[in-house]
Amino acid sequence: MKPAIFAVLMMVATGAWAEWMNYAETDEVAFYIDLATVRKDGNRRRVWALHDLKQRGPRGDSSIRLLFEYDCKDRLNRILARITYSGKMLTGTALDVDHKISEWNQIAPRTIFEAALEMLCK
């Protein structure tokens, strides 16, 4: 099975059983991470995250599940997979699946991504 297809299947299959820990919140989004899914590979960490929107997005999405990869040494992150849902906390209909790997992004200080990096790389 191709890795991208397997990742998408794992996103759909494991969402209900995840133990989401809220680690940050803004007026628009509550940010969660599932520490049980952290995978370490040298200076890199992979983890599932959940962004629960407080208002429905322009395409009808209410929550987003993301597979992030963090580079602890160089303070970078990127998205490996993303799926959007019509309902809160990954419920409802899956609206969009994207398994295109994003470019690496430098993590800015005092952001939700820095909070996740600190948690994952300590």
Image: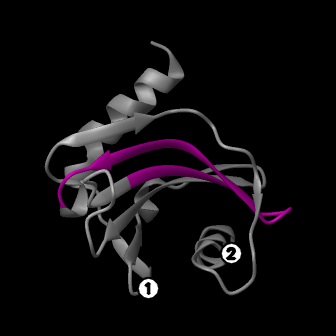
Circle 1 residues within 10 Å: few <14, some 14–19, many ≥20: few
Q: Quadrant of the N terminus?
A: top left
Secondary structure of the residue carrying numbered label 2: loop
Precedes in sequence: disc 1 or disc 2: 1
Instruction: Residue lying at the far top in this picture: please name it.
Output: 1
Q: In the figure, is residue 57 to the left or right of 87?
A: right
Choose between 95 and 90: the one closer to the eye. Answer: 95
What residue is at 73 percent from the left and 45 percent from the top? 103
Q: In the figure, is residue 10 to the left or right of 101?
A: left
**Residue 74 in sight:** yes
Magenta highlight range: 65-87
> Which quadrant of the figure has residue 23?
bottom left
**On screen, 107 above or below 15?**
below
Q: Quadrant of the C terminus?
A: bottom right
What residue is at 17 percent from the left and 43 percent from the top? 93
Asked whether the residues under the numbered discs 1 and 2 touch, taking CB atoms below 8 Å apart as contact, a structural biologist would say: no
What residue is at 62 percent from the left and 72 percent from the top? 113
- The mark closer to the camera, 1 or 2, is 1
Distance Cα–Cα, label 1 vs label 2:
24 Å
**On screen, 86 above or below 53?**
above
**Residue 71 among those drawn in magenta:** yes
**Residue 71 in sight:** no
What residue is at 26 percent from the left and 61 percent from the top? 62
Residue tagged by mark 2? 122
Circle 2 residues within 10 Å: few <14, some 14–19, many ≥20: few
**Residue 98 among those drawn in magenta:** no
